Image (cartoon, rainbow, N blue to C red):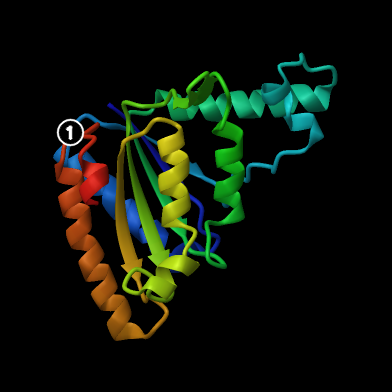
Amino acid sequence: MKLLHIDSSITGDQSVSRELTARTVAAWVAAHPGTQVEYLDLATAVVPHLGADALGFRTGQAAATDAQRRENALSEALVSQFLAADVVVIGAPLYNFTIPTQLKAWIDRIAQAGRTFTYTDKGAVGLAGGKTVIVGLSRGGVYSTSEGGRAMEHQETYLQTVLGFFGITDVRFVRAEGVAMGPEPKAKALAAAEGEIRAQTAVAANQPEVAQVA
């Protein structure tokens, strides 16, 4: 089993989402011995945002310049790495009500027609099913307990949507909310997240029903 561990927080050792992913990966490996782990840090191995030279995988045109060849090679490496993983653990802090730009750049690179999704006469169909994704969410405030908070949050909802678009039905979330509201709320949030980590990593990979109860 191959596990791809992705972090996107820019706050280094102060990052709660990095703590969540580290604990999640350790718990998964303990529960599923023999798992091979590959690590991608989007804050240090920064993925450039899409530009004109990076659109080869969308247009289907052959690269004509060195810049286009480099961009195509990067997109190919990232989507191949993602598709090769059986389990993906993603650290996603809430920045300005959504995910970090570093994580969005990575998603834009792997959102490739013919690789992670395709269009049919009945609409879009995901091609990257059969894998488990566990997302470690960190939030300074609390967004999940009120209608207003849920309306402002475009982090978990976006990831659920785009991963579902790729055909992934086993999407699990570990949440730590209110971590900027003082030491006691942060400690409670991390304790609650630890319980979620144990529960989510104990379940075998590729279980569609997990997405419904997470």
From what the image shows, is residue 21 above or below residue 88? below
Q: Which residue is mark 1?
A: 33
Taking the spot 55% from the left edge, 40% from the top edge, the residue there is 107
Taking the spot 27% from the left edge, 44% from the top edge, the residue there is 211
Q: Quadrant of the N terminus?
A: top left
* Total labels drawn: 1
Taking the spot 55% from the left edge, 48% from the top edge, the residue there is 103
Identify the image quadrant of residue 113. Answer: top right
Looking at the rendered structure, the kind of residue marked 1 is: Pro
From what the image shows, is residue 73 above or below residue 89? above
Out of 152 and 155, give the one closest to the viewer: 152
- Across and down, in percent, residue 188 comes to 24, 76
Out of 152 and 73, give the one closest to the viewer: 152
Taking the spot 53% from the left edge, 60% from the top edge, the residue there is 98
SS of the residue under disc 1: loop
- Decide: few, some or many residues near mark 1? Use Cα within 10 Å; few <14, some 14-19, many ≥20: few
Q: Is residue 206 visible?
A: yes
- Across and down, in percent, residue 128 comes to 41, 26
Toward the right, the furthest residue is: 65
From what the image shows, is residue 197 above or below residue 113? below
Q: Is residue 106 left or right of residue 143?
A: right
Q: Is residue 44 visible?
A: no
Q: Is residue 164 left or right of residue 154?
A: left
- Across and down, in percent, residue 76 comes to 60, 23
Identify the image quadrant of residue 15. Answer: bottom left
Toward the front, the furthest residue is: 122
- Across and down, in percent, residue 7 comes to 46, 50
Toward the top, the furthest residue is: 62
Q: Is residue 123 left or right of residue 180?
A: right
